[in-house]
């Protein structure tokens, strides 16, 4: 996971507004059990692209990983956005 974090951080130096890089960075941190860093990266991905359901799914995984029941709220929001995008 350390190499993934390095590569993703390098990508963010090139394009600091790339929301998908933040989501993948969050997942890399989650894999390494760096939950605070994972949460921070995930929140940044949501801030940059609030309509992307995958970002909320990642946040739900992080929150559930630290036994935070807020994870269920993030998961529900991801499902709502996914259904909304399918309807359009």
Image: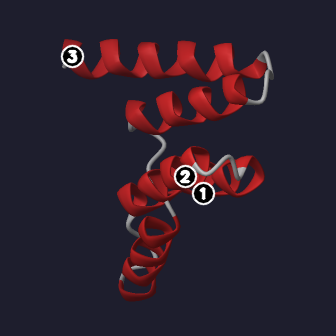
Q: Is 86 left, or right, of 56 in this rendering?
A: left
The residues bearing labels 2 and 1 have C-alpha atoms spaced at a distance of 5 Å
Q: Of residues 7 and 11, which is closer to you in this image?
A: 7
Give the residue displayed 44% in from the left and 14% down from the top: 80
Q: Position of residue 28 (x, y in %)?
A: 50, 54
Q: Is 1 left, or right, of 82 in this rendering?
A: right
Q: Of residues 41 and 50, which is closer to you in this image?
A: 41
- Vertically, is 41 above or below 18? above
Q: How is the image coloured?
A: secondary structure
CA neighbours of label 3 inside 10 A, class few (<14), some (14 to 19), many (20+): few
Give the residue displayed 59% in from the left and 45% down from the top: 30
Instruction: Point out which mark residue 26 bears.
Output: 2
Q: Nearer the viewer, mark 3 or mark 1?
A: 1
Secondary structure of residue under mark 3: helix
Q: Which residue is mark 1?
A: 41
The residues bearing labels 2 and 3 have C-alpha atoms spaced at a distance of 25 Å
Q: Nearer the viewer, mark 2 or mark 3?
A: 2
Give the residue displayed 21% in from the left and 12% down from the top: 87
Task: Mark 2 and mark 1 in contact? Answer it, CB < 8 Å.
Answer: yes
Considering only order in the chain, which callout, 3 or 2, is on the residue closer to the N terminus?
Answer: 2
Q: Is 58 left, or right, of 67 in this rendering?
A: left
């Amino acid at each position: 996971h350390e190499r993934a974090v390095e590569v993703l951080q390098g990508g963010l130096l090139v394009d600091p507004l790339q929301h998908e890089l933040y989501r993948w960075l969050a997942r890399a941190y989650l894999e390494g059990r760096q939950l605070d860093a994972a949460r921070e990266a995930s929140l940044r991905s949501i801030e940059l692209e609030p309509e992307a359901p995958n970002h909320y799914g990642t946040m739900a995984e992080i929150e559930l990983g630290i036994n935070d029941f807020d994870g269920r709220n993030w998961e529900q929001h991801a499902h709502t956005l996914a259904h909304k995008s399918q309807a359009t």
